[in-house]
Image (cartoon, grey):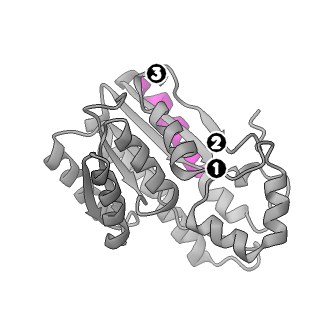
Amino acid sequence: MMLENKVALITGAGQGVGQGIALALAKHGAKVAVLGRTVSKLEETARQIEERGGQALVVHGDVKKAESLESAVSQVVAKWGGLQILINNAQEVPLGSLLSVSEEALEAGWQSGPLATLRLMKICYPHLRGDGAIVNLASTAARRWDATHYAAYAAVKEATRALSRGAASEWGGDGIRTNVIMPHAKSPALAGWIDANPEESAAFISTIPMGRIGECEQDVGEFVAFLCSPAAAYVSGQTIAVDGGQAYMP
């Protein structure tokens, strides 16, 4: 129970990677608040946590709205008295060629990704001081040699990485560690893409040295739990690909 007595807030925790992280943190003893727009999905994550003996709090909100983020943190602190772990996972994904991707899609990607991440880190800062851990999610899309159709998505995720490095640099002395992961996992979105693009997805999977897509809880969630634990107390400011060895991170 390496996260016992810790309180965690996870955005986009109703499915996929966010849900996997929530389940893993709860497994290791954390009290977990799940934040998102679809209550039914959040309730399913909370049900699974509680079914396993953990504690969960459903927080309905939109990460693109500053007032939702303020309310979410207030609810968590009121419920459990503090907050030691922040996971910024939610992200609307702007995909398409540079000529086809709309400004509206890029703006939604910016608002749900780096802007929401910065806002939430700042709101949580007073609670995280002393013994806090932040894990923000980026993407190996930014490490692709061929960035066709992925440039807008990579741009917002790279902004999240830059903000994360800034937080690690500025807040390390305050006892707050900030790291970034770049995961591959069987989220509903990725599963849908695999089904819709069998040839492209087969080629993609063939470039993963371990030969498989990761599991949301066992592969990604467990690693995030480690990053938030005392075992990783000297790890901060890092970007780590959790992707079976595919990305090269010089």
Q: Is residue 204 above or below residue 62?
A: above
Amino acid type for the residue under numbered disc 2: Val
Q: Left or right: where does residue 137 sit relative to residue 140?
A: left
Residue 70 falls within the magenta-colored stretch: no
Amino acid type for the residue under numbered disc 1: Gly
CA distance separating discs 3 and 2: 18 Å
Q: Nearer the viewer, mark 1 or mark 3?
A: 1
Q: Earlier in the sequence, mark 1 or mark 2?
A: 1
Amino acid type for the residue under numbered disc 3: Ala
At a point 61% along the width and 37% down the height, the residue shown is 239
Q: Which residues are magenta?
A: 159-172
x then y, percent, for residue 68: 29, 63
Mark 1 crowdedness (10 Å alpha carbons): few <14, some 14-19, many ≥20: some
x then y, percent, for residue 142: 72, 52
Image quadrant in which you'd find residue 201 = bottom right
Residue 167 falls within the magenta-colored stretch: yes
Q: Earlier in the sequence, mark 1 or mark 3?
A: 1
Q: Marks 1 and 3: CB-CB under 8 Å?
A: no
Q: Marks 1 and 2: CB-CB under 8 Å?
A: yes
Residue at image mark 3: 231
Residue at image mark 1: 214
Q: Secondary structure at mark 2?
A: strand
In the rendered image, which quarter contains the N terminus?
top left
Residue at image mark 2: 242
Q: Left or right: where does residue 123 sit relative to residue 216?
A: left
Q: Is residue 74 above or below residue 202?
A: above
- Of 121 and 57, nearer the camera is 57
